[in-house]
Amino acid sequence: MRTGLFSIGLDTYWDQFDGLLDNLNGYHAQIHDRISAMGVEVIDAGMVDNPDKAQVAADLFKREDVEIIFLFISTYALSSTVLPVVQRAKVPVVVLNIQPVAQLDYDKFNAMNDRGKMTGIWLEHCQSCSLPELACVLNRADIAYHVVSGFLQEDFVWKEINDWVDAATVAEGMRANRVGILGHYYGGMLDVYSDLTQQSATFGNHFEILEMCELFELRKAVTDEEIADKIAEFNAKFDVSPDCEQSEIERAAKTSVALDKLVQAHELGSMAYYYEGVGEYESIVTSIIAGNTLLTGSNTPIAGECEVKNVQAMKIMDLFGVGGSFSEFYLSDYVDDVVYLGHDGPAHFAIAEGTVGLVPLPVYHGKPGKGLSIQMTVKHGPVTVLSVVQQRDGSVSLQFAEGESVEGPALQIGNTNGRYKFTMGARAFMNEWSRGGPSHHCAVGVGHIGDKVEKLAAILGIETRRVS
């Protein structure tokens, strides 16, 4: 991901105050190095201190196709050095109102008794001077912007900047994502029906409509050697229950190999699926969970019941590096004040608490047939729950909540399920979460990333709802 960076200043100052420009460029270099260390390419326009340099910076950012721009207010600067840059670039702008220190040493400063040198030092620390001017102009130009205020060595500042970098990286990842749709919706599950055009308009991704007969043909061509290799992968990554019949393991392995080939053939970054069918087609869909779980844990999230909105949420979580396990609400425990979340797969085994069990199910509830399923719980500790919501007016928004995955009894029913505690309590949480109008599915990831989700929404230009 390419991020733009430039500082603003006033060229009139440089001849008036010795050393001022060198010091400001030093602060700029620190910011450049810290952002570069976040794993992105920094397109650096340097010090922009007059309108001519603003045009050069605008051309640079446009040519290099940056995803986001960080604007460092190094000292007082004219807004005419900013407006041409952000107008031309047309990407999110984060204004860095960052001082060199948290507090000026006033006694030492006032003891200098040289008003010329004192003014130069003040200008080195007067970042806040330009912020209202920039805000006024950007507001009047109807250009969205965001502000980080603080001082150079402050952890808060670098967390904020890192969150913006992560959010911009995820926005780029979502735009590059090819989402497969295999099969059809679960009939009558009205909440999962999605407007694909609106999803593409919001996230910029491509939808690839897939045919089950293609997966059928790929599966027919799977060799015994490929099945053996996949079974070895099952044994390496799952705790395979001795209750699993060998024929079921082989059936799931054969489907998993075909799924891998389908994903590779269409360069998919995620997929939503559901199918029932008869004969060999039923054999495919009832042996799909293990392979889809491997794909999900390897950065290709797969959502069941053709839940497109939720595979988008799972992909967001995966791009943030926190998982994104396919989930729905199982039950509420009003004694321990927790909510259970889980599903019959696919799961994100990369965020499991302990090993992931591969177990037999005599029946898939609400679905045809029987086969293998996943038994796991999300890692204990902080979690974020995310849903992509489509509103009545067709717009897309993000709803999220931060909670804790806590220890306690899991339902040993061959599903992913765990216990989640929210500050407001189980009763209020269920009411507030549902009030936002999400589908009954959601994505669970590890860690509290609500601030990043809000920044991603700001970059995408959509609304967020924090349930807390």
Image (tube, grey):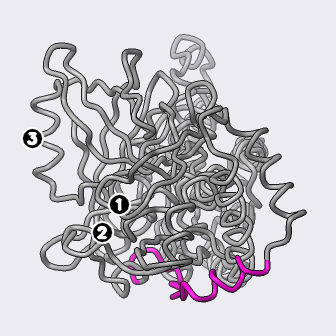
Q: Which of the 4 image quadrants contains residue 89?
A: bottom right
**Considering depth in this image, is 7 or 91 the residue closer to the camera?**
91
Badge 3 local density, few (<14 within 10 Å), some, or many (20+)? few
Residue type at numbered disc 2: Asn
Q: Which mark is residue 431?
A: 3
Q: Is residue 148 above or below residue 422?
A: below
Residue drawn at 71 percent across, 46 percent down: 38
**Discs 2, 1 touching: Cβ within 8 Å:** yes
**Considering depth in this image, is 339 or 205 the residue closer to the camera?**
339
Find out whether residue 21 is within the magenta segment.
no
| Secondary structure at numbered mark 1 | helix
Q: Which x, y percent locates residue 296?
A: 60, 55
Location of the C terminus by quadrant is: top left
172 on left or right of 305: right
Q: Magenta residues?
A: 201-221
Q: Which residue is mark 1?
A: 135
